[in-house]
Image (cartoon, rainbow, N blue to C red):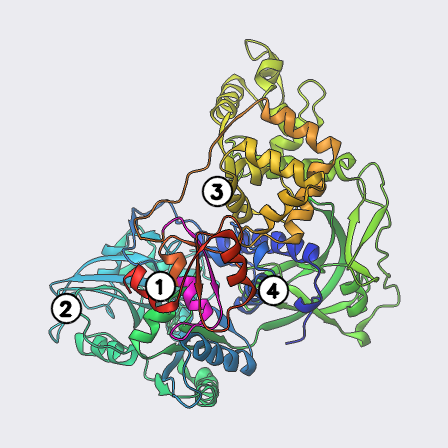
Amino acid sequence: MPAAKPPVETLTEAQASEELAWLAKEIGEHDRRYFEEDQPAISDADYDALRRRNLAIEQRFPQLVREDSPSRRVGAPVSERFEKVRHKVPMLSLDNAFSDEDVVDFVARIRRYLKLDPDAPVVMTAEPKIDGLSLSLRYEQGRLVSAATRGDGQEGENVTANARAVADIPNVLSGNPPSVLEVRGEVYMTHADFLALNKRQEAEGKQTYVNPRNTAAGSLRQLDSSITAARPLKFFAYAWGEVSEMPSDTQSGMVAAFERYGFHVNPLTVRCSSAEELLRQYHTIEEARAALGYDIDGVVYKVDDLALQQRLGFVSRSPRWAIAHKFPAEKATTILRGIDIQVGRTGALTPVARLKPVTVGGVVVTNATLHNAEEIERLGVMIGDTVTVQRAGDVIPQILGVIAEKRPADAQEFVFPTVCPCELRTPVVREGIGTGGEGVVRRCSGEFACPFQRVEHLRHFVSRRAFDIDGLGDKQIEFFFNDPDLPVRSPGDIFTLAQRDGENIKKLKDKEGWGSVSAANLFAAIENRREIGLERMIYALGIRHVGEQTAKTLARAYGSWKDFHDAAVAVADADAQAREEMDALDDIGDAVIDSIAQYFGEAHNRDLVENLAGQVEVMDAERPAGDSPVAGMTIVFTGSLERLSRDEAKAMAERLGAKVAGSVSKKTDLVVAGPGAGSKLKKAAELGVEVIDEDAWFERVGA
Ligand code: IVH
């Protein structure tokens, strides 16, 4: 797959942060279209490329992982149409592999994590990844009692009546199943059934579906289950949720048990014991793909031994013990009609390709990302060119390349603007990449003078994960920003709106798009947010590199607005001790600290913050709860551990409510040291921090 974006290894932290913000938004929108509307805008392969890129950037810059990162959530919020059901065991997703190398890495990662001997085999299963809709079926005493879609992974839709209408789903199980059994798998539709159904729909003047996957989803999410019953849905069982007595201790054994209970399981599932064998099965399945009669979009590999699955656990949305090896993306060609420039919150200028609408894998695509000027140059693309577009999943597609022979005589070169498209026409600057060269991100140098940036800042400030003010969306922010009577130019202005409008909502109610009810509702919503949690407050400031996760870390560490603010100002004033303390926090490094220093170093921002803090009451952060003996502690692992890999140790400590830090400081509560521990041990001794060995660690946590 040709890379249409700069390689992750070459990204600067600033570029990475910028792109992660963009990816979060983009993927979110496509998730919404996919899950809520069942009308994806782009192909699965492009979607996966975005998720994969997101993950790759996050792996390189773990400190930049955003609270709203797609890797932290699965799918989109659930549809309102069905009753919601909370999954007892979350329905998570899978990470993706796109190349043989990714698969080799995956197996190597597992071996490393488990600290396996080089010659110890790891048995894995390989099975088709069905392109349908996942469903969780709960059986009690062998009878189907409820069925739920995945939804956002935590909460799905109750589609029990519809599941009962699916012929492939047994209502009563055979073969002596456990008393409580949640079977999970994929609802799908065959190509033949899809075509026949669409033909019928068309003949009856009804909505036709884009692809079998959407049809399966649309059919299962019918409010009238007689419609579901009339649709030929099928189901493969491949996973489980709550199970009272496990019928097997392997993945393959579980699936074999499902078959005994009366489910269909995929016949192309095999057990393998090396990456080479997995790849062989990938090719076997790829060759069988065209003749299967139903859509698959890759091959899923899973560790067979359930005890190992348990040890491997999960990273955010996906298990460490499984991966989906995806088939290559879908492509199409179309014409590049123009390039628009968008200005983001931090002033980054992003070129967006406007395309002649084209269908890629059944979905209409009208724009594509071009990332930056280098990308335009690399592609050598001109306006009017015929370009190859690739789409994966449900996100903005990518341009892969130009078909040079098709270039029209009047094709126009795109000249990247040297001034911001905002009214100030401020010069655009390129960000240095720290190696003497210039970075690829072009930024409007106007900062708080650039109206685009100011509006984006305000939008961020009121966004759902920040102040979350109902009725104050993108449109309204722009309205107030430009309104001469009730201007909002800075966050604090939001909280003086009602007062500025006077006692009886004098001005706003007469403005276009507003009435006395909507104005009163808005003022009430603003009033509601006058009390705000510390982490939201920090996140809302929109400091570069300070996403939700970082804001949370800062909030927990400093506890109160005053302490955070004092520390931030001290850091801005180059106070070495304040910097060191901040640096000791988990996942907080130079990029974040520099950003905070820069932010609080600006008089404009200090005024903004002071003004805002005068309007709101910031609540202290909650201390993490937990009753494990290490809950709330900050722990440092050092030296080599015998029984655990470093990653497993970290995951274990975090599961128990502890924080794991990379270096020893005054804030460290406990150091777990193995052989070969050096400077950290010395530092612990200097600071009088308790030090224990690996055995004592297991004893302490009772594992
Ligand atoms: S295993 C904990 N196996 O792919 C993960 N998933 O991207 C359990 N899917 O949500 C999932 N075929 O909807 C698994 N053979 C298979 C699958 C499969 C399709 C879907 C499923 C899941 C998504 C993950």
Q: Marks 1/4: CA distance?
A: 29 Å
Q: Is residue 189 left or right of residue 646?
A: left
In the rendered image, residue 590, in percent from the top left (x then y), is placed at 66, 53
Q: Marks 3/1: CA distance?
A: 25 Å
Q: Secondary structure at mark 2?
A: loop
**Label number found at residue 697:** 1
In the rendered image, residue 138, in percent from the top left (x then y), is placed at 21, 61
In the rendered image, residue 399, in percent from the top left (x then y), is placed at 69, 66
Mark 2 neighbour density, 10 Å: few (under 14) some (14–19) many (20 or more): some
Q: Which residue is under mark 2?
A: 178
- Does 644 appear in magenta? yes
Q: Marks 1/2: CA distance?
A: 36 Å
Q: Closer to the N terminus: mark 1 or mark 4?
A: 4
Q: Marks 4/3: CA distance?
A: 24 Å
Q: Closer to the N terminus: mark 1 or mark 2?
A: 2
Mark 1 neighbour density, 10 Å: few (under 14) some (14–19) many (20 or more): some
**Residue at figure coordinates x 84%, y 36% from the top left:** 424
* Residue 604 in which image quadrant: top right
Q: Which residue is under mark 4?
A: 60
For the view shown, which residue lies furthest in the right direction? 409
Q: Marks 2/4: CA distance?
A: 44 Å
Quadrant of the rendered image holding ligand 1? bottom left
Q: Which residue is under mark 3?
A: 556
* Residue 366 in which image quadrant: bottom right
Q: What amino acid is found at the position of numbered circle 2 in the picture?
A: Pro
**Is 553 in front, or is 187?**
553
Q: Which residues are magenta?
A: 631-651
Q: Closer to the N terminus: mark 2 or mark 3?
A: 2
Q: Are marks 1 and 4 in contact (CB under 8 Å)?
A: no
* Residue 293 in which image quadrant: bottom left
Q: Marks 2/3: CA distance?
A: 43 Å
**Is 409 in front, or is 553?**
553
